[in-house]
Amino acid sequence: MKIVLASSNEHKVQEINEIAADYGIDVKFILPPNNFNPIENGKTFQENSYIKAREAWKLAKSWILADDSGLCIDALNGAPGIYSARYADTPELRIKRVLNELNGTADRKAYFACAMTLINPQGKVEYSFEGRCEGTIIREPRGKNGFGYDPIFLPRNYTKTIAELSEDEKNQISHRSVALRQILNYIKTNLLITEIH
């Protein structure tokens, strides 16, 4: 089964395919056509996920999976939230901005959220789910793996940041893997494989 992943991020496709490969069902995620360019003007991760899914469906008219994710920090009233990827011009500057805004703040609780929407070839929402990874924001970046805010995010009950974990370790706990496993469970349990090829 092939599912178009409503993203232009090849790293994300690779990460999701790695998680799916361990799952015991034959699912391959692929990039959408080149002119995929959604306008993410939703007010929640779920809304943006749906916007991306619908835009990809208009181009591919097939099974579509879209996700929208970001970092939500309690002391910043949920920021950067849906603006996580646009909080500054580069990943380094985004991290710097978050750390500056948290300077002197004792409450550093945060979570990564990932909303996923699965749309069927008829263009209807088949299933949606939001996964979370709870943790805290540390004061200095650590680690070279991962991307985005991973170097400053310490998952709950861990002593390593996301950026210090191996890909396998990250894929056990990340917000994206939590959401994806729910989606894969849905596919495995509720959809006949013969009908979705």
Image: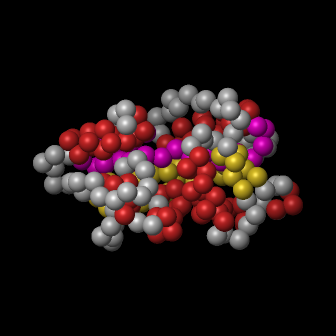
Q: Is residue 181 visible?
A: yes
Residue occupying the point 33% across, 71% down: 157
State which quarter of the image contains the N terminus.
Answer: bottom right
Magenta stretch, residue numbers: 60-82
Image x and y of residue 129, in percent: 57, 54
Quarter of the rendering containing residue 158:
bottom left
Is 66 displayed left or right of 4 in the figure?
Answer: left
Is 19 displayed left or right of 42 in the figure?
Answer: right
Image x and y of residue 51, in percent: 60, 35
- Give the number of marks: 0
Compare residues 67 and 32 and report the one nearer the observer: 32
- Which residue is at the far front? 144
Image x and y of residue 63, in percent: 75, 47
Whether 187 is drawn above or below 102: the answer is: below
Residue occupying the point 61% across, 62% down: 18
Q: In the image, is residue 62 part of the stretch drawn in magenta? A: yes
Image x and y of residue 112, in percent: 41, 53
Whether 81 is drawn above or below 177: the answer is: above
Residue occupying the point 82% across, 62% down: 193
Residue occupying the point 21% across, 41% down: 101
Compare residues 121 and 95 and report the one nearer the observer: 95
Is 27 displayed left or right of 142 in the figure?
Answer: right
Q: In the image, is residue 11 part of the stretch drawn in magenta? A: no
Q: Is residue 137 visible?
A: no
Is 66 displayed left or right of 90 in the figure?
Answer: right
- How are the residues colored? secondary structure
Whether 19 is drawn above or below 100: the answer is: below
